[in-house]
Structure formats: C-alpha cells, structure tokens
Image (spheres, rainbow, N blue to C red):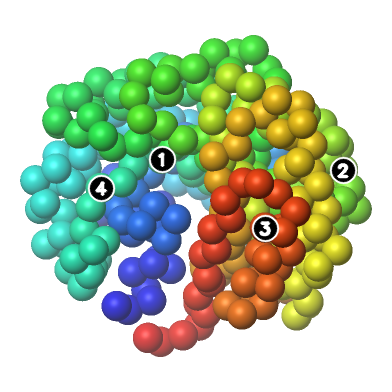
Amino acid sequence: MKTAILSEHSRQFEQLRFAYPVVSRRSRGLSLGLNVNPDKVCNFDCPYCQVDRTVAPRDTSVDFDVMVAEIDALMALAASGEIWTHGKFADTPEKLRRLNDIAFAGDGEPTTYARLGEAIREVHKLRLKHKLPEVKIIVLTNALLLRKPDVMDALSELKAGPYEVWAKLDAGTQDYFEYIAGRKLSLAKVVDSIAHAAEQLEITIQCLFPTIDGKDPGEAEASAVADRINEIQAKGGKLRLIQLYTTARRPATDRIGMIEDARLDELAGVIAAKVDVPVEVYYGRHWDSSD
C-alpha cells in the first residue's frame, strides 16, 4: 500500500466545502470527516498542527444545510462502495475498504461549534437512512471545553448510537503542555475536564508525541502522561483506550518531526506499564517520502 493513502488527509475533496473522506490509521478504514471549523480558529495552537493559518480559509463559517448535504452524499458513496472507484482511493487494500466512522474534526476545535449537537443528530438520521447503524460517530476534541454544560449537552446526542469521543492529552507536565498546546493553559484543568466528561461518556485518550528539533518528549514525559491518566480514572472517569501516535502529515512548522517506530513503542511501554487502560500505537509517516 502506498503510504500516501494513510498520510494524505486533505480536508478538501472534489468541490466539497465541509465534508471529506480519508483512510485513517486510527479508524483502520474509511473515515468521513466534517470540518466544523473552516475558519481555522482554534483555542489551541499546537506546533505539530498541519493547518497553515497563514493561508486565508476558503470558508469563514459553516453552511449547515450544505454540510449535511455533503455528508449525505459521501455516506451514499461509501454505502454503495462507489467511493473505492475514485482515483484517490483506488489502491486502498481490501482490509481497509470499510466505513468506520463519521468524524467531527476540522481546522479547529469542534466543540466550539454552536450547532454541534444538532449536527450530531442529523448525522445519526443519515446513519439510519443509509442503513449504516453500526458506523460510529466520533468527535475529536482538545478537551478544554468539556466542563461546559452546552458542550456536554451536545455530546450527549452521541448516545443515540455507536460513538467515540477522542480527547487530546499530549502532555503530562505543565511546562511541556504549554509548549505542545501553544497556549498558557492549565493542564490540571484539562485533566479535570476529561475526567468530568468521562463520568458521562466513554472517552478515548489521543496522545500525539512528535519530535521537536529532533528530540522526542522522553520517558519522563510519557510517565507523567500515565500519571494524568490515572488521575482521570481516580476521579471516576471511564477510559476506553489510549491512542499513542506521532506525526503522519506535514506540520506547519519545520521544527516538528516524526518519532521512529521502535522508539514510539518504547514510550508506549512506559505508559502501558503504569495504567490499566489498553494502549494502541499508530506509527508515523515520512511526509517527504515518495512511496
């Protein structure tokens, strides 16, 4: 399989403005994305982010009806199998030719979108329309707003069918958190927000470890991440999985790189040794590779 299939996660497909298909490492198949932050506004400024905010966005707001129509069309293509005839996906291996999820992601933080709950309800209706009741709805979040009642009300709409919430926890110490989030925010508050949400919804932790100027976060940071995960569970949070991964798409800054597979396994081992949550590792991709 060409690595481009897994590393090319463009949020523009054909003439669509808000919906896009990708073959995802973590979904192990096709993920249909919804970009609810086309204006590129985010409350984090992660240095590993691939969103180039020096380029003006194509759209500055979501046209809700257009977004619903676009995801409807993509779900129809996926349900029929026609999507695999598209040039971008023609070389996809058979084992990955499955629709795993519809994911609220995008060029910013999805939980800042005021109509998130309504959008989740519409996607659930489409899931039934296309006879795809087993397909998950996934919301990716940096977890900063998970204590807000309106955000949790929106996320409660996920309970209508299969779902996952992927909450970012890229750091275990305050200093490293401030760097990797690009903001002077409180790691303790983020941990508390994840714990709060995980009392009501099952949460998957997503932890991206990049290299910064050629250096990875190290064993001490990985151990501290494990400590924060244990804090979440001690507060009653239900955690489904820890996803440890590294860069697979070109970041906006050249200081950021990819951790090699064996080293990522070592850091995963540090975390796994201290927690009772399964840890899955997703290896990176050299974005300058031609194969």
Residue 198, image quadrant? top right
Query: Disc 2 marks which residue?
Result: 184
Q: 14 and 182: which one is in front?
A: 182
Question: Nearer the N terminus, badge 1 or badge 3?
Answer: 1
Circle nearer the viewer, 2 or 3: 3
Give the image location of residue 159, x and y in percent.
42, 20
Q: Residue at x 67, y 77 (%)?
A: 263
Q: At label 3, which amino acid type do we have? A: Ala
Circle nearer the viewer, 1 or 3: 3
Q: Is residue 185 left or right of residue 3?
A: right
* Badge number at residue 103: 1
Query: Disc 4 marks which residue?
Result: 99
Query: Disc 3 marks which residue?
Result: 272
Q: At label 4, which amino acid type do we have? A: Leu
SS of the residue under disc 1: strand
Q: Residues within 10 Å of mark 2 (few under 14, many from 20)?
A: few
